[in-house]
Image (spheres, rainbow, N blue to C red):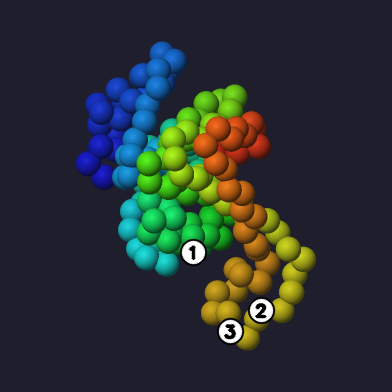
Amino acid sequence: ERYLGTPIEAAIHSVLGRGGIVGGTSAGAAIASSLMISGGWSDPKLASGFPLLPKAIVDQHFTQKRRFERLARAVYSNPERTGIGVDESTGVFISREKAKVVVDGAVYVYRATANPPCEPQADSHDPIYSFLSIETARLLPGDEIDARDLDVFGH
């Protein structure tokens, strides 16, 4: 909230426009997505971030703080976005061509996929669960994925 629309945000975009690299850890990673997780435990609190990764939702301290359900719920409620969960001591370099995992931990990629219509389950209080499921991929250090497959920039 403090940096959106300020000269700091403009400077970050300027660095990227010149071909530079921008990075962030913890909240600095989460703010890279235009829709960011700003809090919550299993139910994410969402806020506006920087549109560096306009079709992503980034969550950090992922395995260490067991944020699997939080990211899944964020992607369920925003199925056009790709969820990216980043472990501590882990980085993911994302360019227009590829994404590559570096350092020690894992990066998790969450995508909503449509299922055939079905009856809501009796124990489900959230009707969205009846027609979407989450595909997940776990990427380890050295793994690369084509940026088009990651789909975080849009068209």
Q: Secondary structure at mark 3?
A: loop
Q: Quadrant of the C terminus?
A: top right
Distance between the alpha carbons at the discs numbered 3 and 2: 8 Å
Viewer-closest of 143 and 57: 143
Q: Secondary structure at mark 1?
A: helix
Would residue 80 be seen by someone viewing this image from the given angle?
no
Is 34 placed left or right of 27 in the picture? right
> Counting residues from the N terminus, which is met first, the one under dot 2 or under dot 1?
1
Mark 3 surroundings within 10 Å by alpha-carbon count, few (fewer than 14), some (14 through 19), many (20 or more): few
Tell me the number on the disc at residue 123. Answer: 3
User: At 26% across and 45% down in the image, what residue appears?
Assistant: 1
User: At 64% across and 31% down in the image, what residue appears?
Assistant: 146
Viewer-closest of 135 and 114: 135
Camera-side mark, 3 or 2: 3
Distance between the alpha carbons at the discs numbered 2 and 1: 19 Å
Given the image, on which type of amino acid does mark 1 rest?
Glu
